[in-house]
Image: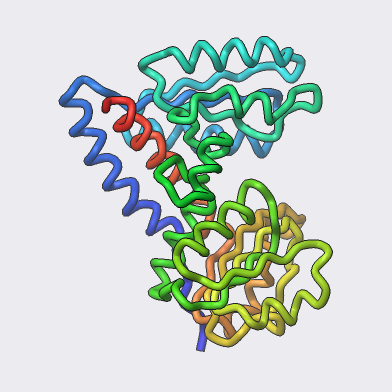
Amino acid sequence: MSALILDGKAVAAKIKMQIRQEVEKLKTEGITPGLAVILVGEDPASQIYVRNKERNCQELGFNSQTYRLPATISQDELLMLIQELNEDPKIHGILVQLPLPAHISTEKIISLIKPEKDVDGFHPVNLGNLLRGEIGMLPCTPAGIMELIKESGVEVAGKECVIVGRSNIVGKPLFHLLLQAHGTVTVCHSRTQNLAEATRRADILVVATGQAGLVNGEMVKPGAVVIDVGMNRLESGLVGDVDFDSVLPVAGAITPVPGGVGPMTIALLMQNTLKAALMQRG
């Protein structure tokens, strides 16, 4: 029996419908959620992501401003722009598209964004709030993953959860979200010995390594929820970190690539921007 396909597009559409209703209410108060996106350089993947964000802002009635800057821009110039956006009352959320050129410190750039405008959820204050289980901006991809797990119908509490990948963007923040949901969480990485032994224990398995087809059907517990965060461009097309065809008959639920986690990340970014506008309204 094949696994339930967790349709990220459909779940994201439901979230965006709720956002649109809230935006209409805010507009009656004279407030339009504003998102500023900063793109440095001409990385093709980053340009696609930024266009997707612009399109979603337009669909939801947000005020969208995109700053396309040359890769040669100085760190000080970029910091000045962020400071201007921090003080702009019409901008509720600021997002700096990563990665940045090597001569620019990502840490300094992210840390300058006001925590209440950090819709990516990467500011040290927001990450600290996540660690403490307090209210703040949640990183978009981990928050989207939690929504997809909820959609699967599986309760996290008491389950064995295994994350493959320990990045600051996905693995580490997701660890805390699963822990707060009372899961028993293991994080695997490049130095984990016998990866398959760990993944086969997982009731909920999240794979976020950037290695195409790393996890196959023999590495998955029958009936497990499998969340594939990978986006790998091969000659054959876009594939995930999970070998979808071999895992499909084993898992209880699985996300496709594309159409799984990706749409959820954008939807949660829009939700964070709305949240930022509501917080700054008071």
- Image quarter in which the C terminus is found: top left
Q: Is residue 15 left or right of residue 64?
A: left
Q: Is residue 232 left or right of residue 96?
A: right
Name which residue lies at 52% across and 45% down.
139
Above or below 88: residue 139: below
Residue occupying the far front of the picture: 132
Name which residue lies at 55% across and 42% down.
127
Above or below 93: residue 221: below
* Residue 43, horizontal then vertical, whole percent: 71, 32
Name which residue lies at 44% across and 34% down.
55
Above or below 215: residue 82: above
* Residue 205, horizontal then vertical, whole percent: 59, 71
Name which residue lies at 47% across and 53% down.
143
Q: Nearer the viewer, residue 210 or 197?
A: 197
* Residue 72, horizontal then vertical, whole percent: 76, 15
Residue occupying the far left of the picture: 28
Above or below 50: residue 262: below
